[in-house]
Image (cartoon, grey):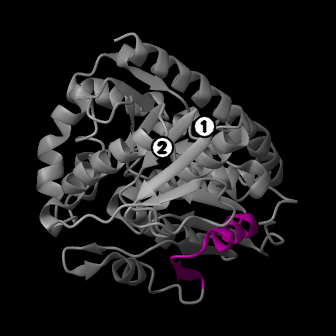
C-alpha cells in the first residue's frame, strides 16, 4: 500500500505524535509498504526508513493548523496523481485533515491522540494562537470523518461521550513501541540503575501531566525517604506568565541536590533517564496511551501512574506497576513510599514481558489489516 501521514509538526519537540508516526511508518515500511510523512516541519528521528514530503504553507498564526489542512489537501492531490495513495492518516489534535476529507481521492483515517480542546481543558488554559478556531471546528471534523482509530478504549469512550460518536465508528489499535531500539541490547541501552531510590518523571512540564500533584507528593516523600531522589525530564511550559518549571522548583526548594530538572532531552538520553531509575512516575490527570509508559516498561522499569484513563489498559497493578487516583498528592505519596520496599526489579521484568504485546511489528500487522479494511470500505462507497 501507499500510505501517507500528515503531521502539523514533525520536529524534535513534537512529542508522542512524532514518536507514534515514526514508529508506525518504520514498521509499515518494514512490511513492504511505501510510507511518506508530510509536514511543514520535518526533522525525523534517526533511522527513518520512509519518505519525507515537505509542505510550505503561508498562514497567520491564528489559523495556522486549519490553513495547513488546505495545503495538505493540495499536496495530497498532486501526490495522488503521481502515485495513487491508498490511505492518508491525520491527527485529531490540530484538524490537519479537515480539508482532506473526501477531497483527495483517498480515505482519510483520523487518529485520536488527544484533541486540542481536551488538552486545553486539562491544562485549564490554551496556549496555541489558533486554539479558538481549532476547538470550534472539532465537532464537525470528528463527526464528518468516516474512519476513526484510537490507541485506547479510554479515548474511544471520551469521543463517544463528548462528541456523541457511535462506538462502532472507532477502531481501537494500541500505540506501538519499538522495543528492540529501547530494551537492553538495543542501540539505546539503558545505563546501570542508580544508587538509592531514584524516581523519574518524563514528559512536558504541564498541569495536565500531573506535575504539580507529583511535586506536592515529593515534598512529603523526600522528607520521609532519605535516599530518594527525583529527575524531571521534559520541556518546560508556561502557565499564564509563569514558568511551570520555576513553580515546581519553588515547591521542592527545601530539597536541593535531590531533585534534578533535565529539560528537553534527545530520545536516547530520555531512555537513559528511564533505565537509570528504579520507578517511573507518570501522574497525569488523564492520558490516552502514553509513550513514556510504554518506553519505561520496555526498559524493564515499573510505572506508577494515574487510574481512570489509558494507563489502565497497559499497567497491571501490583504486577508491573501501580495505579492511584489522579489529582491526589497524598495517595501518590503513599504509593511512592510503599514502592520503596517492593521488589521493583521483579516488577520491572514483568513490565518488560507485558509491553511485548505492543511491539511495533506486532501492532503493525493490526494497522495493516485495519488499513486494508478502510480501503475496501472506501472502494465500495
Q: Which residues are magenta?
A: 258-277
- Give the quadrant of the N terminus: top right
Would you place residue 45 above or below residue 74 in this image? below
- Is residue 337 at all visible to an observer of this figure? yes
Q: Which class describes the residues within 10 Å of circle 2: few (<14), some (14-19), or many (20+)?
A: many
Residue under the image location 38 percent in, 14 percent down: 168
Q: CA distance from mark 2 to mark 1?
A: 28 Å
Q: Find residue 314 and name its label.
A: 1
In screen coordinates, is 157 left or right of 304? left
Magenta span contains residue 21: no
Residue under the image location 21 percent in, 67 percent down: 58
- Is residue 287 at all visible to an observer of this figure? no
- Locate residue 26, reporting x and y percent: 65, 49
- Locate residue 337, reporting x and y percent: 62, 59
Mark 2 = which residue? 4
Would you place residue 322 above or below residue 371 in this image? below
Rendering quarter of residue 361 = top right
Amino acid at each position: 500500500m501507499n500510505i501517507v501521514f500528515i503531521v502539523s509538526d514533525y520536529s524534535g519537540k513534537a512529542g508522542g505524535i512524532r514518536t507514534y508516526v515514526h514508529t508506525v511508518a518504520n514498521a509499515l515500511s518494514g512490511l513492504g509498504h511505501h510510507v511518506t510523512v508530510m509536514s511543514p516541519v520535518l526533522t525525523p528521528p534517526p533511522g527513518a526508513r520512509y519518505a519525507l514530503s515537505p509542505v510550505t504553507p503561508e498562514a497567520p498564526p491564528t489559523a495556522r493548523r486549519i490553513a495547513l489542512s488546505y495545503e495538505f489537501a493540495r499536496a495530497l492531490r498532486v501526490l495522488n496523481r503521481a502515485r495513487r495513495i491508498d490511505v492518508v492518516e491525520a491527527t485529531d489534535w490540530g484538524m490537519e485533515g479537515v480539508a482532506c476529507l473526501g477531497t483527495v481521492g483517498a480515505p482519510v483515517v483520523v487518529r485520536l491522540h488527544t484533541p486540542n480542546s481536551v488538552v486545553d481543558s486539562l491544562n485549564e488554559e490554551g496556549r496555541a494562537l489558533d486554539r479558538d478556531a481549532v476547538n470550534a471546528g472539532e465537532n464537525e471534523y470528528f463527526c464528518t470523518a468516516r474512519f476513526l482509530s484510537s490507541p485506547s478504549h479510554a479515548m474511544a469512550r471520551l469521543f463517544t461521550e463528548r462528541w456523541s460518536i457511535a462506538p462502532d465508528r472507532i477502531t481501537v489499535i494500541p500505540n506501538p513501541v519499538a522495543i528492540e531500539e529501547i530494551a537492553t541490547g538495543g542501540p539505546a541501552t539503558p545505563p546501570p540503575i542508580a544508587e538509592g531510590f531514584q524516581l523519574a518523571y518524563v514528559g512536558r512540564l504541564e498541569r495536565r501531566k500531573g506535575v504539580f500533584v507529583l511535586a506536592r507528593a515529593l515534598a512529603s516523600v523526600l522528607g520521609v525517604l532519605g535516599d530518594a531522589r527525583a529527575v524531571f525530564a521534559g520541556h518546560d511550559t508556561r502557565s499564564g506568565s509563569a514558568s511551570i518549571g520555576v513553580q515546581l522548583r519553588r515547591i521542592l526548594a527545601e530539597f536541593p541536590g535531590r531533585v534534578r530538572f533535565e529539560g528537553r532531552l534527545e530520545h536516547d538520553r530520555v531512555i537513559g533517564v528511564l533505565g537509570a531509575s528504579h520507578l517511573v512516575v507518570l501522574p497525569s490527570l488523564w492520558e490516552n496511551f502514553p509513550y513514556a509508559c510504554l518506553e519505561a516498561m520496555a526498559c524493564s522499569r515499573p510505572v506508577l501512574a494515574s487510574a481512570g484513563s489509558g494507563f489502565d489498559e497497559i499497567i497491571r497493578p501490583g504486577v508491573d506497576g501501580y495505579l492511584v487516583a489522579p489529582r491526589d498528592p497524598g495517595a501518590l505519596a503513599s504509593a511512592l513510599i510503599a514502592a520503596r520496599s517492593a521488589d521493583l526489579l521483579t516488577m520491572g521484568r514483568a513490565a518488560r514481558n507485558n509491553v511485548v504485546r505492543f511491539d511495533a511489528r506486532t501492532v503493525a500487522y493490526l494497522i495493516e489489516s485495519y488499513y486494508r479494511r478502510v480501503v475496501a470500505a472506501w472502494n465500495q462507497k
